[in-house]
Image: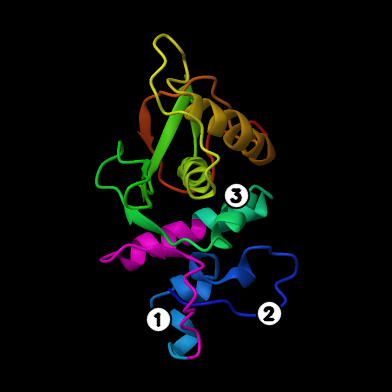
Amino acid sequence: MAGKQEQNHGGNELATLGGVFNSLNINVYSYTHQNPLKYMDPDGRKLEFAKGSTPQFRQQIAQMVQYLNKGHASAVLAELQKRPETVYLKEGATLQDFYYDPNSKTIVVHPRSGLQVSPGKVQTPALGFLHEAGHALGDVKGTAASTAPIPGDPYDTKEEKRVIETIEVPAAKKLHEPIRHAHHGPEMEEKEVKCSTCDK
């Protein structure tokens, strides 16, 4: 991905970070601002799309980032973007493909997969993306909790509880999205990034 670009973006904390957070880098027609040599970003401080990512997926991630940033819920993404490690973004093939793989440092996202947390209440794919970014950040910082299964626990693991309670729930409140109190829920296909079932 392209590197950092120093501009004043009117308080948009992610736009100056480059990578997937700068819409010029996501648009396939303006990749690296038409100058790939000037914006190579050799230090690897970025989120990077996996090989073969489509222009549509890149645009969908851009929409998610814009939605989270508009709701002031993107701090985890900003911190992850500043890390020295490279984390990859890959499009999931099915609605169930939404996870972080610590072995390949890859966040797998299905851009239309919302999570139903209660009847008629569905979280956006953007919030799911933030959730998985929380796992990625915990992994690269060494602050992730145990992933050992806890029988009978609604969160399944201490790591899921950590991310849900400390990252996802605060973001959901800022975005006026529904909140969950357990790890699992049925995946629902969402037509757009904007939350269609949120409390206003």
Q: Which residue is mark 2?
A: 7
Q: Are marks 2 and 3 in contact (CB under 8 Å)?
A: no
| Element assignment for label 3 | helix
Q: Where 107 sits versus 7, above or below?
A: above
Which residue is at a point 47% across and 20% down the rendered structure image?
155
User: How far is the residue under mark 2 from the one under mark 3?
Assistant: 21 Å
Give left or right: position of 74 versus 61. right
| Residue at the far top in the pictured view | 152
Q: Quadrant of the N terminus?
A: bottom left
Q: Where 155 sits versus 98, above or below?
A: above
Q: Which residue is mark 3?
A: 76
Which of discs 1 and 2 lies nearer the camera? The answer is: 2
Q: Report crowding for label 1: few under 14, some 14 to 19, many 20 or more residues within 10 A (C-alpha).
A: few
Q: Which residue is mark 1?
A: 29
**In the image, residue 103 lies at what x, y percent?**
32, 48
User: How far is the residue under mark 1 from the one under mark 2?
Assistant: 20 Å
Q: Report crowding for label 2: few under 14, some 14 to 19, many 20 or more residues within 10 A (C-alpha).
A: few
Which of discs 1 and 3 lies nearer the camera? The answer is: 3
Q: Are marks 1 and 2 in contact (CB under 8 Å)?
A: no
Which residue is at a point 28% across and 66% down the rendered structure image?
51
| Residue at the far front in the pictured view | 142
Question: Which amino acid is tagged 2?
Answer: Gln
Which of discs 2 and 3 lies nearer the camera? The answer is: 3
Q: Which residues are magenta?
A: 38-63
Task: Of the two numbered discs 1 and 3 on the same chain, state the one appearing first in sequence.
Answer: 1
